[in-house]
């Protein structure tokens, strides 16, 4: 009898402990490769999908919404940067309650130059709406725009749900502002719509989270507001400014590049090809009535042609006290990783980069971090600082990053926040997959052709000691010159970087006046070791290993093509280089319909001039085929 009772207690304890520390990831997909297109008459079109989420009794720790756009399976890809919304439409089944909650907003990329194998995935945290993402939920994706309905995207929307105790139990969600409000109209100022909102906190509320999605649109003269003008916004709580920021975003570092349109131009708190992260502010619950207000920078369109609009949605989510005192959570491994969102700096070799968050009620002052590549000895680092509840930090860890050839797994664990046992350790660990570095020979050639503004560009290589072993500074380049620098390296790990202070790369179709440049690494025989993208915005990055045993990578294309100018009234040139003589076809298309075709047999290299002045003004795609295989696509404009 005693033995049976003991066995029962042990089993119960094992089940209890398992429940405490177990965490699963559930995936709920509401839209799977759905073809989305526009309604030219209405300017918007809705696409609905249902998902079965955890029931209200199941603990939910975090929810991330992942949105993927891809080239359609059997249609042409869309071209323009349109503002799309993702709504939590209904809960409780088809006869349930209409919610009309904005979960996120995505600005579509300029897709004209994307090939059929293209796709990109973004993600945003939507845990604030976890109380509604329960049981049967209808999600609405609203795609805006005025493109022909034969153009579109393949859309997938997935919710990655981490089970486990809530960081803090939600109480309510209240809408504060929602609409597209005029900006710059002296007869209808935006403050008519952004009036102070009174809020009463629940008796058991500890804090509220103000969650704001805001993007600026329209670009009328003289100031380009609100898409192309920087303006400030203040968030005010009970008479105190809790945040003031410029609503402006640098687009030259967009992880989705290059795109077919003016993707490099900075914009009003968004970029083309971007799922916006909301601006969030936690405020302490007040037993008295509280006032929330948003103030915009005073602005009047001086010529009266008001085109500016501020698309604003804001909520306040009330929460109870955080459930744990000592609790820290991994947010992201930014390097090393294969995630597209961090592709500009990956694969990386010298500096792991992570983000973590304090989700305990006590301020986080220290935490031990254990990290390393699986199969290698772990490293340890002690972080010290101060993070309040729900504050996060980005940390660059001491390197290097070890790797084996092929795929690798990088692991991170957070241990003992403030020297205490973490009260929910399941989200202290995270891993990422990443590829090994490209291997280059010890001696290779940096082939660098400048554009008309070489003063904007710097090239350099650093070694493991962070010593600069090669560089070409802006003052060392003349316009429209080809430089071939031979680099001699010792065996080891290196990082190469090209920076562009103008934010428009070595070439950008909308600015033909800056000319065009290119950058390649070549071996001693002239074979291409690595192509760099000329239309690169703020620059390019490559981490690599130098070895005497390096071999030519057969996956690297030995073809090179350059079209200039990509914005023209009549003439343009194509520089084409093939490794061996082959059949070449150059095809100009409008909405996937060929309008001009040129074919060349037994072609190896040369320059062609084309005159498209007879074509109607507009956007065209140049497709280049080698032996009837599509190798290259570029967007051009006939002005």
Image (spheres, rainbow, N blue to C red):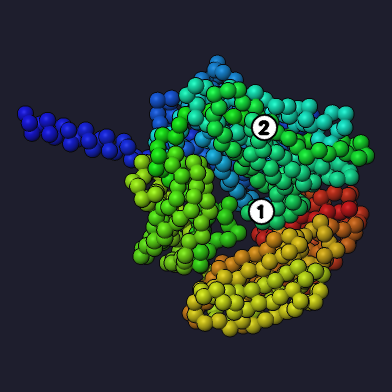
Q: Secondary structure at mark 1?
A: loop
Q: Secondary structure at mark 2?
A: loop
**Where is mark 2, residue-wise?**
239
**Percent coordinates x, y for residue 584 in the rendering:** 73, 65
Q: Which quadrant would the N terminus be assigned to in this image?
A: top left
**Quick one: 203 or 533, which is closer to the camera?**
203
**Percent coordinates x, y for residue 7 in the rendering:** 13, 34
**Percent coordinates x, y for residue 278 in the rendering:** 62, 39
**Where is mark 1, residue-wise?**
254
Q: Is residue 180 above or below residue 512?
A: above
Q: Is residue 285 above or below residue 538?
A: above
Q: Is residue 237 left or right of residue 335?
A: right
Closer to the chain start, of discs 2 and 1, is 2
Q: Is residue 481 left or right of residue 306?
A: left
Question: Which image quadrant is residue 314 in?
Answer: top right
| Point 58% across, 74% down: residue | 462
| Point 82% across, 66% down: residue | 515
| Point 91% across, 40% down: residue | 302
Residue furthest out toward the left = 1
Question: Which image quadrant is residue 440 in?
Answer: bottom right
Q: CA distance from mark 2 to mark 1?
A: 36 Å
Query: Which of labels 2 and 1 is toward the front?
Result: 2
| Point 54% across, 17% down: residue | 96
Q: Residues within 10 Å of mark 1 (few under 14, many from 20)?
A: many
Q: Is residue 626 left or right of residue 563?
A: left
Q: In the drawing, what numbered circle is on residue 60?
A: none
């Amino acid at each position: 009898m005693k033995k049976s009772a003991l066995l029962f207690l042990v089993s119960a304890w094992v089940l209890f402990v398992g429940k405490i520390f177990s965490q699963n990831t559930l995936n709920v997909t509401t839209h799977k490769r759905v073809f989305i297109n526009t309604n030219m008459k209405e300017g918007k079109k809705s696409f609905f999908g249902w998902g079965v989420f955890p029931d209200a009794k199941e603990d939910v720790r975090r929810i991330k919404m992942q949105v993927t756009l891809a080239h359609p399976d059997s249609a042409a890809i869309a071209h323009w940067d349109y503002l799309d919304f993702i709504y939590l439409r209904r809960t409780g089944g088809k006869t349930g309650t209409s919610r009309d909650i904005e979960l996120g907003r995505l600005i579509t990329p300029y897709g004209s130059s994307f090939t059929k194998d293209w796709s990109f995935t973004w993600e945003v945290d939507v845990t604030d709406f976890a109380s509604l993402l329960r049981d049967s939920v209808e999600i609405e994706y609203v795609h805006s725009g005025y493109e022909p309905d034969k153009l579109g995207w393949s859309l997938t929307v997935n919710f990655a749900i981490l089970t486990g105790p809530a960081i803090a139990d939600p109480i309510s969600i209240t809408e504060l502002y929602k609409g597209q409000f005029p900006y710059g109209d002296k007869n209808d100022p935006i403050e008519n719509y952004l009036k102070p909102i009174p809020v009463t906190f629940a008796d058991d509320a500890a804090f509220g989270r103000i969650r704001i999605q805001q993007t600026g649109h329209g670009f009328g003269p003289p100031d380009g507001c609100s898409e192309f003008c920087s303006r400030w916004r203040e968030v005010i709580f009970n008479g105190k400014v809790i945040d003031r920021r410029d609503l402006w975003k640098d687009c030259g570092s967009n992880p989705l590049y290059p795109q077919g349109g003016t993707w490099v131009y900075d914009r009003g708190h968004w970029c083309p090809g971007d799922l916006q992260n909301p601006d969030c502010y936690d405020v302490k619950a007040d037993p008295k009535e509280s006032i929330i207000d948003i103030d915009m920078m005073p602005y009047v369109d001086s010529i009266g042609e008001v085109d500016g609009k501020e698309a604003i949605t804001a909520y306040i989510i009330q929460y109870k006290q955080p459930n744990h005192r000592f609790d820290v959570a991994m947010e992201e491994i930014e390097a090393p990783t294969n995630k597209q969102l961090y592709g500009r700096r990956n694969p990386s070799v010298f500096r792991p980069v992570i983000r973590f968050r304090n989700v305990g009620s006590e301020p986080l002052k220290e935490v031990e971090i254990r990290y390393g590549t699986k199969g290698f000895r772990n490293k340890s680092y002690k972080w010290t600082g101060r993070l309040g509840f729900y504050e996060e930090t980005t940390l660059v860890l001491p390197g290097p990053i070890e790797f084996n050839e092929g795929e690798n797994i990088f692991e991170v664990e957070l241990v003992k926040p403030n020297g205490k046992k973490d009260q929910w350790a399941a989200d202290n660990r995270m891993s990422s997959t990443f590829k090994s570095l490209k291997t280059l020979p010890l001696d290779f050639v940096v082939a660098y052709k400048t554009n008309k503004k070489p003063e904007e560009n710097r090239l350099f290589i650093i070694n493991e000691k962070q010593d600069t072993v090669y560089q070409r500074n802006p003052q060392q380049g003349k316009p429209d010159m080809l430089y071939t620098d031979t680099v001699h390296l010792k065996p080891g790990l290196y990082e190469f970087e090209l920076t562009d202070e103008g934010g428009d790369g070595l070439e950008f179709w909308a600015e033909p006046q800056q000319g065009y440049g290119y950058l390649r690494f070549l071996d001693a025989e002239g074979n291409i070791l690595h192509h760099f993208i000329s239309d690169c915005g703020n620059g390019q990055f490559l981490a690599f290993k130098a070895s005497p045993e390096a071999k030519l990578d057969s996956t690297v294309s030995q073809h090179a093509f350059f079209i200039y100018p990509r914005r023209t009234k009549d003439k343009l040139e194509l520089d084409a280089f093939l490794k061996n003589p082959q059949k070449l076809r150059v095809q100009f298309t409008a909405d996937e319909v060929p309008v001009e075709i040129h074919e060349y047999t037994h072609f190896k290299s040369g320059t062609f001039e084309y005159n498209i002045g007879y074509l109607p003004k507009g956007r065209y795609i140049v497709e280049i085929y080698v032996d009837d295989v599509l190798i290259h696509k570029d967007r051009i404009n006939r002005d």
